[in-house]
Amino acid sequence: MYATQALTDLVPLADELDKNKVTPGVLGFIVFAALAAGVWLLMKSMNRHMGKVDFEEAPDPDVVAADATAGAGSAKRK
């Protein structure tokens, strides 16, 4: 059976549905609640992991070299 034949068989069934009464139902609520719970758990886990991060940025070598040369020059002037 071709896909077009299957679609033409389902078109009359779609006309019988009352478009004002179609709702996502219980399954839609369960899926939405599961997604919301998953996002909440992921955010909680991310916050816990970010709290464990102890990052200290190394100084920029160019700035350190510039400070060293500037400091040496001022010491010679005295």
Image (tube, helix red, strand yellow):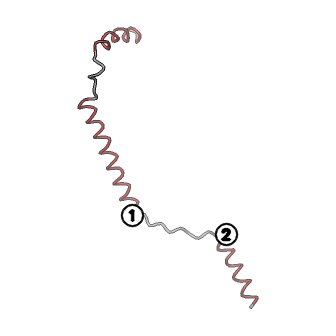
Residue furthest right as drawn: 77
Where does residue 40 sit, x and y in percent of width and height?
32, 49
Counting the numbered discs, the total is 2
Q: Identify which residue, 18 or 41, lies in the foreground.
A: 18
Residue 57 lies, with reference to residue 7, above or below; the image says below
Q: According to the image, label 2 marks what residue?
A: 62
Amino acid type at circle 2 is Asp
Quarter containing the N terminus: top left
Where does residue 6 sit, x and y in percent of width and height?
36, 11
> Quadrant of the rendered structure where residue 12 is?
top left
Q: Identify which residue, 52 or 33, lies in the foreground.
A: 33
Quarter containing the C terminus: bottom right
Amino acid type at circle 1 is Lys
Residue at 38 percent across and 59 percent down: it is 49
Crowd rating for badge 2 (residues with CA inside 10 Å; few <14, some 14–19, many 20+): few
Residue furthest left as drawn: 26
Q: Identify which residue, 32 or 68, lies in the foreground.
A: 32
**Sequence-first tag of 1 and 2:** 1
Residue 13 lies, with reference to residue 41, above or below; the image says above
The disc at residue 52 is 1
Residue at 42 percent across and 63 percent down: it is 53
Crowd rating for badge 1 (residues with CA inside 10 Å; few <14, some 14–19, many 20+): few
| Mark pair 1, 2: CA separation | 30 Å
Residue at 65 percent across and 71 percent down: it is 63
Confirm or deny contact between disc 1 and disc 2 (CB under 8 A).
no
Residue at 28 percent across and 29 percent down: it is 24
SS assignment at label 2: helix
16 displayed left or right of 67: left
SS assignment at label 1: helix
